[in-house]
Every structure is written in structure tokens, then in C-alpha cells.
Amino acid sequence: MESLGSVNRLSPSLPKTLLVPCNAQIRSLWTSKRALHFTVCCKLKSSQGKRDSAKLISKKIVLSGEVPPPLAEEKSGPAGDAREEAGKSRTVGGAGFVKRFPRRVLALLSNLPLAIGEMATVAALMALGTVIDQGEAPDFYFQKYPEENPILGFFTWRWVLTLGFDHMFSSPIFLGTLALLAASLMACTYTTQIPIVKVARRWSFLSSPEAIRKQEYSDSLPRASVQDLGVVLMGAGYEVFLKGPSLYAFKGLAGRFAPIGVHLAMLLIMVGGTVSAAGSFRGSVTVPQGLNFVVGDVLGPSGFLSTPTESFNTEIHVNRFYMDYYDSGEVSQFHTDLSLFDLSGKEVMRKTISVNDPLRYGGITIYQTDWSFSTLQILKDGEGPFNLPMAPLQINGDKKLFGTFLPTGDDDSPKVKGISMLARDLQSIILYDQDGKFVGVRRPNSNLPIDIGGTKIVIVDAIGSSGLNLKTDPGVPVVYAGFGALMLTTCISYLSHAQIWALQDGTTVVIGGKTNRAKVEFPEEMNRLLDRVPEIVGSADSKNPGGVGG
Amino acid sequence: MIFSTLEHILTHISFSIVSIVITIYLISLSVDEIIGLYDSSEKGMIATFFCITGLLVTRWIYSGHLPLSNLYESLIFLSWSFSIIHMIPYVKKHQNYLSTITAPTTIFTQGFVTSGLLAEMHQSEILVPALQSHWLMMHVSMMILGYAALLCGSLLSVALLVITFRKALRIFSKNNNFLNESFFFEEIQYMTERNNSTSFFSFRNYYKAQLIQQLDHWSYRIISLGFIFLTIGILSGAVWANEAWGSYWNWDPKETWAFITWTIFAIYLHTRTTKNLESVNSAIVASMGFLIIWICYFGVNLLGIGLHSYGSFNLH
């Protein structure tokens, strides 16, 4: 300290006389802030027990400045902050029990092990939710989890139904844990992360070589100048601050702030999810080609905030439904040509939708999700066309099967005989005769008649119906904003916040530094950078006016 | 036809190169300091990387879409991701322990891909309507890159656990406070100082501590990287789902398990922020994450339930 004082007096770049009055002021600020910092620490320690590692380090910085160093100086901004903080601490100190209670809750919520426990609980509940079949009738659970033979010796249908595990993702337990997690997120951001920002934002010089050597990484360069080091660090992308013999540089400060952004983005997504759950409408409809429906008839509210809008009066006409096929005959895409009409019957929009390409109009989104075979148009012995409704015979997944029946001969006879027609898609119809024997396959529009037991059948057209899903979701913009923020902040979080202090001690430069994430790469990078600092040959004193003394 | 032959050749070349590389690794593990051998194994890995890249490109050309539409293709992509993770430190001339993890993992995935179990899935399939989107590339590639990075990181953590296991047992028996126990470098150093009578022992302990520290650090960095990929993958999947299925989140089993994986690694990253939960405890979390990734990637596909069923096995 003594030698540094003398350095300071000699240094022309630091007019001591000017610094004295502000130093006194700063000193008072320092002390008041120190007091505040201690109260914060104590509070966190007593209530929390465990604290962030970065927090610990930050405390170390402040403690190293416990005796106000002659060179430690604050920018006016942080100094103002400090004054505010000091004021705040006084008001908090004067508050009664009423104010302390929420603070205790806050401290409890921001407890890291609790937050970890909540995350683990959410994960476990989700896992359970995928193991237990969701949304089945109670009978299903009576059979699957019988009381006579409980799984693991205790798990029966009573557990499932009482705790609401049959609809896990909307059960009070799951949503409650999520809400608790959200509360923890907020509390942690408020009590732990924001103070870190406050500490990280003040950049301070370290003025004693001992303090610098105490850093995680430290080195000293003989016959070097701190200015050269500053230039090298600047070249490596560091923000460099130089004041007389002291240097402070940092890089990747955003990496220190980004976790806050991650938490806020998570909260935004949760808010968006809540808005979605409370304020959306959903519905699905299967419409044969050529028919209409009204949006409002299909949509049903999902939450208490769901309010219908103007556009619910829109009438939708399915102009055409068709499928694209691969050469192998498999479906490659479904298309539906939709026209939207408003109340006055004017067409407001027309679009052909397909899977992955929904229609959006006035907050309503229409998705192509399903299809079905509506009717088969045939000519029987040149008469018709007749419309035969197709019935779904098998509808699991993509392997659909539809069928219809055309009675032939005497309608009055008790034993009805006729032609069966089956179809897997709209492309080809398989025909069977009265005895159930395979006759042939016909494509619609081929106009090729087929003779079955004396009846000539021509398949005119196959009319499909389009399975549409409709929804309105006011939460989507919020959720998307959260998604964007989360992606961005998670990426930024990978950055490592590195801080470097250096001090000209005679002809030697003492360098110390630390980082919060890339702890192994940082020393390597430092060694590489320090190798680039030029060695000063000859008289160092003439080159560095600040580096006298020693 | 020429494409399938080429594909066949490339598959087998990559598999055989990886197995040779593994042998070299095992040799260099037991016989120390044969730089030439180590170098050749690195070259072998690069050759593998190009083989798998060629394989993927061939498939891409003849199927006309990105080769990420079924489990077989995603597994090839996974082993490609492993080899790329293996390559990065090599290109940056950065010596670390990652390569000992990535090379065997590549061989296991590659071996599994080429094994007979999935033989019927080798045929490139047509793309179902729901997969015909530009999001396919973004979502699946990000997810698999994320899986690969997270698997590597958690394997490093498993290695860390194995190395500390004996020491851990001793300390656990001494101190019942399981979670608060920490395994610091300083502590080990302190223990070494106490046992200073035998310098060999202390040297070994020092080496071990340094190894543990390195493993810990690299698993942390790789997992952070994988976490970014996983986040982007899940979110792009959510955006895609909002385009194709009608909602950005459907609680589909695959989706849910991806979220569970994400949560587990979020827990891992949080344990890292507290000094006294570091190292071993976070490594335990990461090794749990290892199992969960496999459940997410394979287990859900085995059941073949939910909307992600096109990734499932066809074993009928």
C-alpha cells in the first residue's frame, strides 16, 4: 500500500489533489455500500444456506476493497446506484414484520435445492404421465391398476384417480408444481441473479499486486508495459480500461447476464402457455367436398377467458379435397381448397391448405389433419349417377379402409345380395360380387365399366371429406416471443465472462484474471495472449512514465 | 442401384475403420506414448467422418430428402455427430479426453446401425405428409446434435464417477451428509499433503485429481453446448408442431421425454452454479441424463406411441 501511494503521488496522470474530495465521498459510499452488502450476504446466508458461486466471488471483490483503495474508483452511474441501494437498505431495515414475511417467502423460494427439487418433481410427474395411459375411462384404470395386485405393492387405480394422474398434464398436482417452479424462477431472478448483475456491472481496478495474485489465474511479465498488454487484450476482443498503472479488462459480460434472460424467457413461455390454456378455442370437423360449415359452430372454448370474435361468423366452403400420391401409390400430401365467406356472403379469402401449411384468418388457424371417404358416385347400368355413402371399416392410423354396398336384384327378398366396394384411398376401388368374390379394381374417372353378375357399374367419382382442425390461440405470440428469447439467451449463456486485472509494478506487470465458465480454456488463452506482449528492451522508465517506483 | 451399392460400401468402410481406430485406442491406452499410433487413429477418425458424410450425402441424393426421416437415418446422423464432435478438438489442436469417449460411442452407434436388427429399415422410405417441411432439417438435426453432445458430456461424467468412485465410498462412509459432500481439488490436495510420506502416491493422486478436474470441466462444456442444441431443437419442434399438428405442445410421449431430458440437464447446469454441489453430484445428475436420453431416443420409439411414430421400429 505504501509503495502504491508513492506511485500515485508521482503519477502525472492522476492528479491527487482533485481526487481527494471525491475520494472522501466515494469512501463514504463504499462504507455504506459495504454495510449494505453485508446485510444482503447475511440475509442470504441465514435464509438460504447455499449460494451461487458467482455470488461468492463477487463478495470477494467487494471485500478486497474493504479498505478503500486509493485508486479504486467508481463511475458516476454505479455510485448513484450505490446511494440508492444505501437508501433502500435503510427503508428495508425500518420495515416491520409485514415486510419481512414476503422476504422470507422470497428467500425460501429462491433456495436452489428447492428449485432443483421442483424441477425433478416436474420431470418425474411428466415421466409418470407418459407411463400411465392418459385420458381413458375409469374402467380402464380399474382393470390396469387393480387393487388386488398393486404395482410396486402400493400403486392402484385409487392413486391414479385421486391424484388426477389419468389427465396428468392438467392435474392440479402437475400445474401446482409448475406454478411453484415459476415462483422459484421469479424469486431466484430477483434475489440472486439481479444482484450478480449489479456486481458484475461495476468494473473496478485492483490496486494491490497481492489482490491480483489471489485471482484464479495469475502471472507476471517482467519488462513489459501495461499499455502493451491493453492493446493485446483489445485485439483479442476484450473491453479494456486503463488508469495509470492499473488495467481492467473483461469479455463476454453478456454471458453473465444471459441466465437472467433464460429465466425471463421461461416465465414468458409459461405465461403464454397459461394464456393459451385459458383463452383458446378448439374444434375439429370432417367436411365432405362441396359442403360448408360455420367456424363458430365447430370451435369450443377451452378456458374461462375464451371469448369469441367477429371472425367466428365466417362460413367456410370446401371447394375441393384431393391427395397427391407417390409412384408407389402411397399418399404424399393432402390438400383442401377452402373459401372463406363473411356474414354478407362475400369471399374474403381462398387458400389451398395442406399438412404443414395451415390457413390463418382473423386469429383462426385451420389445419389439414385428417381425411375420410365420403361418397362414391356410380352409374348402374347407365343410370344415375347414384351417391353411395362410404362407411369407415377400419380407421387406425394411416391404414384406413372404407366400404359400401350396392344391393342388386330384388329389393323385397329377405336375403339381400349385392356388390361390395372397398377402398383404401380415393385412387382405386376394389369390387366384389354377390358371392364375395373379387372381381376387379377400378379407378374413378376412368369411365371403364365393369360387369358384375350382369350389372354394369361405372365408377364416376370418389368424393373425399377433409378432416380439419380449427383453433384460436391468443397465447401463441407470447410463447413465440419466449421461444425466441430462450434460444437467444441460451446461446449467449455459453459465453464465458472473463475478467482481467493488471498492474504495473515497476517494470513488471502483474496480471490476474478469472472466468466463470471456460475455466480450462481461459489460462491457455491468457498464456497465448501474454506471449504476444512485447518485451521492453532498454530503459523501461523512459517508456512508462506511470511505472516508476519499485 | 449404384447408389445402394455405394451406400453399402461406405457403411462397411466406416464401420471397419472405426473398429480399427478403437483397437488402436486400446493399444495406445495400454502401451503409453506411441505418438505415431495416436496420429494414425486420428486420421482414421477423419476417414470415418468422411465415409459417414458420404453415406448421408448418397442417401440424400437418391431419396431426394434430408436423410433424417426414420430411426436408421437418425442413427447414422447420430454417429456422424459423434465424429464431428470428435473432430472439433482435433482441428483446434486442443488435446482433451473427449476423443476417448467419442470414438467408442461412434463405433457403438455405427455398429448398431449396421447390425442386422435394423436391416429392414435400411431402405429409404417415402416422406409422410407431416414430415414434408423445412423444419425437418432444423428440428431433427438440432435434436440429434444435442443428443450426441449430451451423450458425450454425460459419458465423461460417468467416467468421472468411475474414477472417483473408490474415493467417494470412503468419504461417504465417513460423512453421511451425502449431498453436501464436495470433492474439491483442494481437498484432495490436502489429503495428499497429509499422505506426503510416499511421494509416488501423492503424485498419482495429483494426477488423478487433475484428470477429474479436466473430465468435470469438459463434460460441463460439452453438456452446455448440447443443451443449446437441445433447446433449439425442442423449440423448433414446437414451432413446427404449431404448423403441422395444430398446437405447439401436445404432451406427446417423445415431446415429453425431450422435455424431461431438458429438465434433467437444466438441473445439471444448476448444480454447477453451487460450489458444494459440483463435480460428483452434478456427475450423478449427468449420468441419469444419459439414461434418460436413451429412453427419449429409443425407448419411446420402441413403444411406437404418439405422434412421433415414424421414428419407431418396424419389427413385425
Image: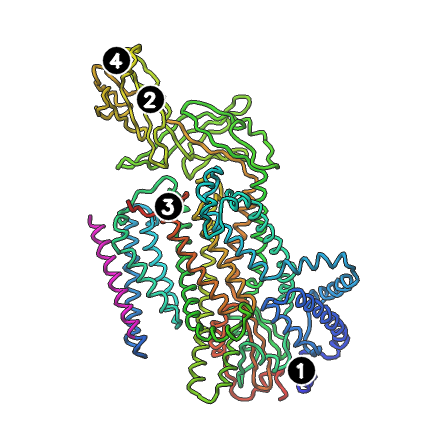
* Quarter of image, res A438: top left
**Which mark lies nearer to you, 1 or 2?**
2
Determine the CA span between mark 1 and mark 2. 98 Å
Q: Is residue A324 left or right of residue A136?
A: left
Q: Residue at x 59, y 82 (%)?
A: A504
**Which mark lies nearer to you, 3 or 4?**
3
| Residue B26 is covered by the magenta coloring | yes
Classed neighbour count for the residue bearing mark 1: other residues with Cα under 10 Å, few (<14), some (14–19), many (≥20): some
Q: Amino acid at mark 2?
A: Leu
Q: Which of the chains bears the disc numbered 2?
A: A
Discs 3, 2 touching: Cβ within 8 Å: no
Determine the CA span between mark 3 and mark 2. 34 Å
Q: Residue at x 53, y 64 (%)?
A: B271
Q: Residue at x 29, y 44 (%)?
A: B125
Discs 1, 3 touching: Cβ within 8 Å: no
Would you place residue B292 above or below residue B126 in this image?
below
Residue nearest the viewer, comparing A239 with A412: A412
| Residue A89 is covered by the magenta coloring | no
Determine the CA span between mark 3 and mark 4. 48 Å
Disc 4 secondary structure class:
loop
Q: Mark 3 sits on what residue? A: B304
Q: Mark 2 sits on what residue? A: A376
Give the magenta range. Answer: B1-27
Discs 4, 2 touching: Cβ within 8 Å: no
Q: Which of the chains bears the disc numbered 1?
A: A
Discs 1, 4 touching: Cβ within 8 Å: no
Disc 3 secondary structure class:
loop
Q: Mark 1 sits on what residue? A: A11
Q: Which mark is residue A381?
A: 4
**Which mark lies nearer to you, 1 or 3?**
3
